[in-house]
Amino acid sequence: MALDLGRVEDAWSKCSIRGFLILSLSLQIFLLVFAPFRKKTAKKWMSFLIWSAYLLADWIPGYAVGLIFYSPRQNSSDFSLSLFWAPFLLIHFGGPDTITAFALEDNALWLRHTLGLVVELSATVYVFLSPFPEDNRLVPPILLLIAGLIKYLERTRALYLASLDKFKESMLWKPDPLPKNGKFEDEHAGEVEQASFDILHEMCTAESLLPRREVAINIGDDTMEPLGEMQLVWNSYRCFQVFKGLIVDLYLTWREREDSRCFFLSSAPEDSLRVILMELNFIYEVLYTKVVVVRSIPGYLSRAIYLSIVICALALFVRMEKDGFPPVDVVITYILLFGAIALEVVSLLMLIFSEWTYISIQKRIGRTSGTLCNYFSRILNAVLSLKKPSWSEHEIGPGDVKLTVFDTPVLFRRWSESISGYNLIGYSVSQRPRKIYKPCRGCFSLFTGGDDRGKGEVEAEVDMNVELERGYFELKTYDLEPKSGDGEVEGK
């Protein structure tokens, strides 16, 4: 029996398109759930998985659009469902909210993403311009095309705002322009000269070249009483507003330095540490996620429009006549529709129960708000309390020095709770790095805080001869020379 190569090629093309559609949706789900673990753990295998999924999530939708572009179009009924599938790939190009860039350099490629939007949109429009059914079945794909355009623009704008040049530009205050009036210049020439002298004097007295940002840190009193969750979040956000300029080589004013110094000196040590952790978390989300785009009035509107469009497309597809469509294609279309809605709902819940929600409440409503806002604040406070760092006592080596270290469950961490260090003296004397041993907690270690690794040692190797006191920014050094009679390390 002769082999029909055309039929084999057609079947392979259809199976490939279906497979890549499901794979693309699976990558979106994986990145939405596991991309935040990049900052929660220092495991190399986790970073590798996230990096691989991040690259594949950009490559697979483009490849699938190409398959649809070149797929055989023998009849309109077989090709009409691809009208649904092409916009979904444009939605997947937009990516989840939890990751827009893997490295800072990715943000600088926002212009390339803009060009990619033009290319992918052109390919999708070409699919629409191909033969399609003569009834109203074209309406849902057009709605999905608009939804995909919204998603792609969100990611491109997030990359643009997180690029270092734009990030720095957004922090610079533009001076008020002087009126172009000769009479004004004559009357106020002396004032302008005096102002120039004052500016030079300010520069010579170590003030910043930049105007002071309108952000102040609540110093509070000198007591060491612990701060509440909401106070920690608010002060962390204020610190973030002050110190984010250091990322792009801006300087702090003398007043900002003094305010921050007084704040940390007047706060409990553990509160100071938690403020720093939250501040770093704000920086991470601004640079690597869509939080800047989503947390704005246009962002709220675009999300409402996007979710409404996808729900309308689902309703229209449910009512659509599906005679002549392969059952597997109908099932895949339903999976894509429900998957898009589920991803958006989960993203919305993650945004609601985050620190940024409380910041928005504080900025728009104020600290004294209504009953509903206070009730929501209590719920948010309970959620944020789950992220409070926990501590446990462990050893550096069996029977050796005991340290109090972080032991927060990975699911509730704000950072990896590990700091890399290199001991040149230990390397010179061929000393093996010390490890902090924790009890192994098996396959549930990802969510319970333990790390399933051999004897159960913590994910960071301690190869520094130092001990970090719980909550205190104080280091205790240790002699390399062991005590006489035993091999213990003596602390100073």
Image (cartoon, rainbow, N blue to C red):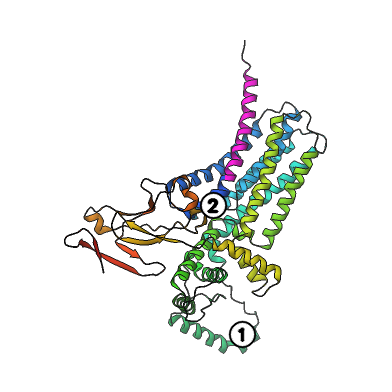
Q: Nearer the viewer, residue 347 or 377?
A: 377
Position in image of residue 380 (x %, y %)? 61, 63
Position in image of residue 423 (x %, y %)? 29, 58
Determine the residue positioned at 68% across, 73% down. 369
Determine the residue positioned at 58% across, 59% down. 161
Check the image and report above or below for 62 versus 260: above
- Tell me which amino acid carries mark 1: Glu
Dominant secondary structure, magenta: helix
| Gap in angstroms between the C-alphas marked 1 and 2 | 45 Å
Position in image of residue 241 (x %, y %)? 54, 69
Quadrant showing the C terminus: bottom left
Check the image and report above or below for 14 versus 458: above
Task: Give the side of residue 337 with respect to residue 480, left or right.
Answer: right
Q: Quadrant of residue 465 in the image?
A: bottom left
Position in image of residue 345 (x %, y %)? 66, 51
- Tell me which amino acid carries mark 2: Leu
Q: Secondary structure beneath disc 2?
A: loop
Q: Nearer the viewer, mark 1 or mark 2?
A: 2
Q: Which residue is mark 2?
A: 109
Q: Is 147 contained in the magenta span?
A: no
Q: Is residue 206 visible?
A: yes
Q: Secondary structure beneath disc 1?
A: helix
Task: Give the side of residue 135 with respect to residue 74, left or right.
Answer: right
In the rendered structure, which segment of residues is drawn in magenta?
Answer: 1-29
Q: Which residue is mark 1?
A: 185
Mark 1 neighbour density, 10 Å: few (under 14) some (14–19) many (20 or more)? some
